[in-house]
Image (cartoon, helix red, strand yellow):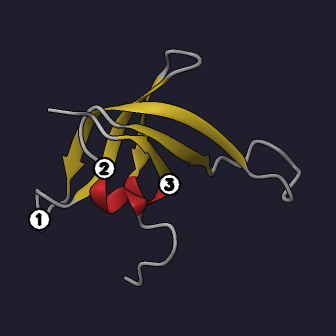
Amino acid sequence: MDYGASDSFLSVRLGDYVVIKDDSKYSSSTSETKYWFGKVINCIGGARDPNAWTLFQVINIDSGEINIINADTVENILSHHQN
């Protein structure tokens, strides 16, 4: 896998606030990219390496909806949770 400019998901931790790129294809408009903000409430590891996050359970901070997203849809980390 080639990690490019959007590899922020590699440093996401539980409790972080993140910007998520909405990859849903609900709209016929392909020129518009939508984003939403969420808080990471669970980090899910991969089958080969349980410590390498492949999925995140995220709560949408606007609607309260809980979603499971692919890790690579995280565009940016807004703030790191302090332990």
Give how far across and how far down residue 83 sits, in percent.
Answer: 14, 32
User: Where 29 sits versus 5, above or below?
Assistant: above
Q: Which mark is residue 12?
A: 2
Looking at this view, name the residue that lies furthest to the top. 64
User: Where 52 sits versus 14, above or below?
Assistant: below
Along the horizontal axis of the image, is 31 left or right of 43? right
Q: Quadrant of the N terminus?
A: bottom left
The image quarter containing residue 43 is: top left
Along the horizontal axis of the image, is 48 left or right of 17? left
Q: Looking at the picture, which amino acid does disc 3 mark? A: Thr
Query: Would you name the residue on which mark 3 appears?
Result: 73
Residue shown at 49% from the left, 19% from the top = 65
Residue shown at 51% from the left, 21% from the top = 61
**Residue 52 or residue 37, whichever sits in front:** 37
Q: Secondary structure at mark 3?
A: helix
Q: Looking at the picture, which amino acid does disc 1 mark? A: Asp
The image quarter containing residue 30 is: bottom right
User: Label 1 near label 3: C-beta < 8 Å?
Assistant: no
User: Label 2 near label 1: C-beta < 8 Å?
Assistant: no
Q: CA distance from mark 3 to mark 1?
A: 19 Å
3 or 1: tag closer to the N-terminus:
1
Front label number (1 vs 2) = 2
**Residue 66 or residue 80, whichever sits in front:** 80
Q: Secondary structure at mark 1?
A: loop
Q: Residues within 10 Å of mark 2 (few under 14, many from 20)?
A: many
1 or 2: tag closer to the N-terminus:
2
The image quarter containing residue 8 is: bottom left
Q: Looking at the picture, which amino acid does disc 2 mark? A: Val
Query: Would you name the residue on which mark 1 appears?
Result: 49
Q: Residues within 10 Å of mark 3 (few under 14, many from 20)?
A: many
User: Where 45 sits versus 62, above or below?
Assistant: below
